[in-house]
Image (tube, helix red, strand yellow):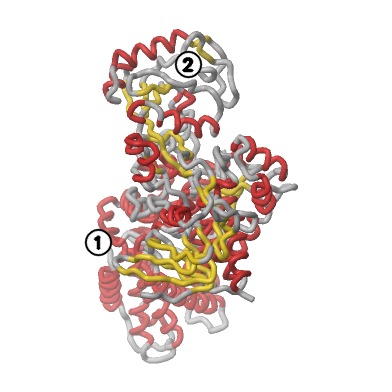
Amino acid sequence: MTVCNACRYCEAYCPVFQAMENRTAFAKGDILYLSNLCHNCGECLYACQYAPPHEFGIDVPRVLAEARLESYEEFCWPAFMSGAFRRGGTLLSLALAVSSMVLLLGLVRSSDAKSDFYAVIPHDVMVGLFGAVGLLIVVALTVGFRRATMSFRGPSSSVASGFSRTAVGDALTLRHLHTAGEDCTSDVETRTPWRRYFHHCTFYGFALCFASTSVAAVYHVVFGWTAPYAFASAPVILGTVGGLGLVIGPLGLLAVRQQRDPALGDPRQAGLDVSFIVMLLMTSITGLLLLALRGTAAMSALLVVHLGFVLGLFLTLPYGKFVHGLYRTAALLRFRTEVSR
Amino acid sequence: MTAPSADVVVLGGGNAGLCAALAARQRGATVVVIERAPKAFRGGNSRHTRNLRSMHDAPTDLLVDAYSEDEFVTDLLRVTGGKTNEALARRVVRESANCPAWMRSFGARLQPPLRGTLHLDRTNVFFLGGGKALMNSYYAAAARMGIAVRYDAEVTALEVVDGGIRSVTIRQGHEESTIAGKAFVLAAGGFESNLDWLKDIWGEAADNFIIRGTPYNTGTVLRLMLDAGAQPVGDPSQFHAVAIDARAPKFDGGIVTRLDCVSLGIVVNRHGQRFYDEGEDFWPKRYAIWGRLVAQQPGQIAYSIIDARSASLFMPSVFPPMAANSIPELARQLNLSPEALQQTVDVFNRSVSRGSFNHAVLDDCRTTGLTPDKTHWARPIDTPPFWGYPLRPGITFTYLGLKVDERARVLMTNGEPAANVYAAGEIMAGNVLGQGYVAGVGMTIGTVFGRIAGAEAGARVSP
């Protein structure tokens, strides 16, 4: 940071450097803030005259990636779960999903009810189980978001982060991955938009799936229309489009990940990244399969498998890579607050 | 062993070399670039730069107002004290106008000035991410266009026959190879990293110089060409130097080792004595003279001393200051005589007459009766903690170069241009910049003459 602040050549790349220049000393909260402003594009590493093998060995993307992990642990609720960020991995997530399946299997009422999900697992049971887990997630994520916001603000600042439409726009468009009018780097001499595109597929795919479930809940509770819904119905269309996005996005992100320069990341976080992507992928694939085969005998088994992955995914949300979206948003809100002051 | 030949062989992979390679390739020539550095350190001193000076008659998307040809030329005449070839200088200035567009056509990304450099918002376009990012863009363009680059390749010999170069011998690791070419562009920089050469001129003092840029500018090509009968230009003993933090690495410390606090306090030598008016003038003028001033002090070292009131008034540097709550304590940390430093500070403080301090103008805070006086921004150094920074001369570039004509052709001692040899960048910058410096002009000279040299070389070899 000292080198960066004395150099400043990267200033126009992204808010990380502008925020850095607004500070002369760096408390822990400042570093966590900067780390969550970073979209890990790599421009500043390749532009850096002090990057390894220079004796100063400056690698901002890696340092901030490491700090991001610390921030995930720092903001985690309940605190004893913070170890999950370091230990978390694909196997653990899958094991959680399988355990969920076993649990769900115990709740199965009937296994030969074609097309009728609630005949397999009663609606009230589903609502009870997922409602309880959902509540836990909401509390954990809210506490995390709040801790992040407080930490980024720092003890000395009198100004709290306010809502900013621009900041939300920044988050939803990944603006800072293409601020300079071109896409971010994937290597020293090439720029491609794929990482951003696949992230959009993933995020909006997830959002559509969430919307699908929400619409279905309204159908059920408000109108008394029960599943299964027709292929042309809103929940199915939302879920299908979202599910496809959630297949293409994670697959693409995995592929992009394979080709990325290892210098840009923190090798300790491979499990954290991959496990979240895999869980999203398994959820969407099993969801789409369930939709396609809901009229067959395989339905009940698929339902258990799909719900198992959903439950596993939900349980890992507050303790996995999902939190980066929240903290990044908190950091972007903080940044806009600072800028507008 | 003989390596595949190319129409145009470019010696040096910095800004000028890459501009020449791109311009030659654009005219259809096959091109190979010989770069002394490994890939990670490619780009010569250009990797440490950040902007280019560009004339313009009306505001552009990057520059405000206008910066006319005459104003730019006047600036050059002023800083060089007339030590310039005005025809070449005028050519550089005129062609600087279309540099930004040309650079962008090869993927260069430009931006308005950085914060803290607003005084350049009328004259200089900045490279997004700095000079290394610019070099990355050029190397990427070179790869797309099929330009070959040899990294880690040191020139060991030039075969000069009949007033032209026939081939160049390079060494990569333990392997020597000879590359023949129809035209050669020399863009291999100056000799500031050649410690033996510096010692020949400056004696033992050179041991205490720090080289701000690349360790690969050893002047090999310059020396080979001068030995082969090329005409020199520029004072062979002179270099551009600024005062930088003495703790900087021997090479490649770049921008972060600069210290902008000289004018805020006092500067003493290793005897604890002041030796020059710290408040004479603004950055960048004072910035450029202090390298030489420190080089002339015993042991080529000096110390900038400020107090707490000035601590936040300058750009942070990469090394933390030596800090102490009393002057003698600070002196001990800096290995100075506590008595001598205390006395210098006391005498200085007593000589300060009250004024209204304003670092943005030549204010009325000065001392009276001192030798030398501090003529602006003089305030008593009395508020602890006291800070000290050790200073050494940091060499930016050397002025000795090859004489060229307007077509970038290298002139031989008989006054005739060499048949197929062109020069661009620092190796010929002395034609335009015989002394002094003005921000961003090195990159302008490199870009303009790189393009001229490449275009001329390309035109020569492709029918």
Discs 1, 2: same chain: no
Front residue of A73/B96: it is B96
Mark 1 vs mark 2: give the one in front: 2
Front residue of B200/B20: it is B200
- Furthest residue toward right: B58
In the rendered image, residue B187, in percent from the top left (x then y), is placed at 50, 57
Residue plotted at (29% across, 70% down): A90
Q: Chain of mark 1?
A: A
Residue B338 lies left or right of residue B65; in this view the side is left
Q: Specify the label residue B443 is tagged with.
A: none
Residue plotted at (37% across, 67% down): A130
Amino acid identity at mark 2: Pro
Q: CA distance from mark 1 to mark 2?
A: 66 Å
Please determine whether, in this image, residue A82 is positioned above or below residue B83. Answer: below
In the rendered image, residue B217, in percent from the top left (x then y), is placed at 42, 52
Query: Element at badge 1?
Result: helix
- Give the position of the C terminus of chain B as an image quadrant: bottom right
Front residue of A194/B404: it is B404
Q: Specify the label residue A87 is tagged with.
A: 1
User: Residue at label 2?
Assistant: B372
Please determine whether, in this image, residue A340 is positioned above or below residue B133. Answer: above
Dot 2: within a 10 Å radius of its alpha carbon, few (fewer than 14), some, or many (20 or more) residues?
Answer: few
